[in-house]
Image: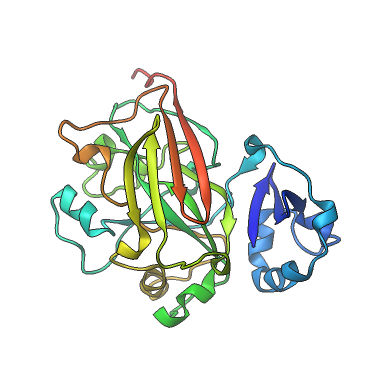
Amino acid sequence: MRLANVEGRASIAAGQGWADVATASGGRFGPSLPAVYEEWDDFSSWAPTAMIARAAVEVDEHQLGAPSPAPRQVFGIGLNYRAHAQESGVAPPERPATFTKFPSCITGPFADVVLPAGGTTDWEVELVVVIGRVARTVTRDAGWSCVAGVTVGQDLSERGLQFAAGGQFSLGKSYPGFGPTGPWLVTADELADADDLELGCSIDGEVVQRARTGDLIFSVPALIEELSAVLPLLPGDLIFTGTPSGVGMARRPARFLAPGEAIESWVEGVGTMRTRIVGDPPVG
């Protein structure tokens, strides 16, 4: 199943188009994405049997918003690919290096993002997990059962602020638009192997990152086990699972994003999103 945010309304893929969930279900589910995630078990049972093909309409990419537009919690996992830890000059962590992105940074898959002051904004393509049911002390074997689906994400990071805050990453990763996600959510059963997907990103057509999620140090189920042992994961929550090697700060010389550049980010079997970097960094 593929689930999209079409102008703020939950929509389900049907043939070559998208059907509005609230309309197709007679008001049983939706219309918002958060409402769907709150009833994920019932919704995911209803969706395969719904007669929605006739209700499907074509959707322009600019109508698409974030697949989970109002998460209550957004987790980021640092250094979760060995090659990225190596390029960062640190040892791979023994437990997930977890930080938060504040939910106000979340934006859609074809958004314009204005650079903040600082001039050291970096790219980080990631597989993003959307939680589908409350998860508390979940074992690794049951990890995927708590997932609504996955999507593509960029953990955009203003490195100057990130490393100037005493090891507290969250502010440097939470400027407006610093959490592009999309283009839609894909359930794990739609994927050939949910634990081993290619992901990557390019800047103005130049590929700067490419890897496979099979290289994650902590897999999706492992992350859910670790996080849910500490606090409940809630429907609609996001986990940015980590970025592979190829980030700008690790290059010599370092390379950072500039106004006018376009980032394309993709995950195999999920889709591609495009983020346009706009504006000059504000003064002061």
Pick the residue in front: 192 or 160: 192
Picture colour scheme: rainbow
**In the image, is residue 185 above or below residue 276?**
below
Residue name at image x 77 percent, y 52 percent: 20
Quick check: 224 above or below 77?
below
- Residue 241: quarter of image: bottom left
User: Residue shown at 46%/47% (left/top)?
Assistant: 266
Q: Is 33 placed left or right of 94 in the picture?
A: right
Q: Which residue is drawn at 30% across and 52% down?
A: 244
**Which residue appears at 33% of the width and 29% of the height?**
257
Q: Quadrant of the C terminus?
A: top left
105 or 92: nearer the eye?
92
Q: Can residue 139 be seen in this view?
A: no
Tally of numbered tags: 0
- Is residue 209 visible to us here? yes
- In percent of width and height, residue 6 lies at 69, 45
Q: Is residue 244 left or right of residue 106?
A: left
Front residue of this view, candidates 55 and 207: 207
Quadrant the N terminus occupies:
bottom right
Q: In which quarter of the image is residue 27?
A: bottom right
Q: In this view, does 66 lie above or below 3?
A: above
Q: Where is residue 201 in the image (x, y as percent from the top left)?
A: 39, 42
Give the image location of residue 248, x and y in percent.
Answer: 26, 37
Q: Which of 108 and 209 is in front in this view?
A: 209
- On the image, the x and y values in percent for residue 124 come to 35, 45
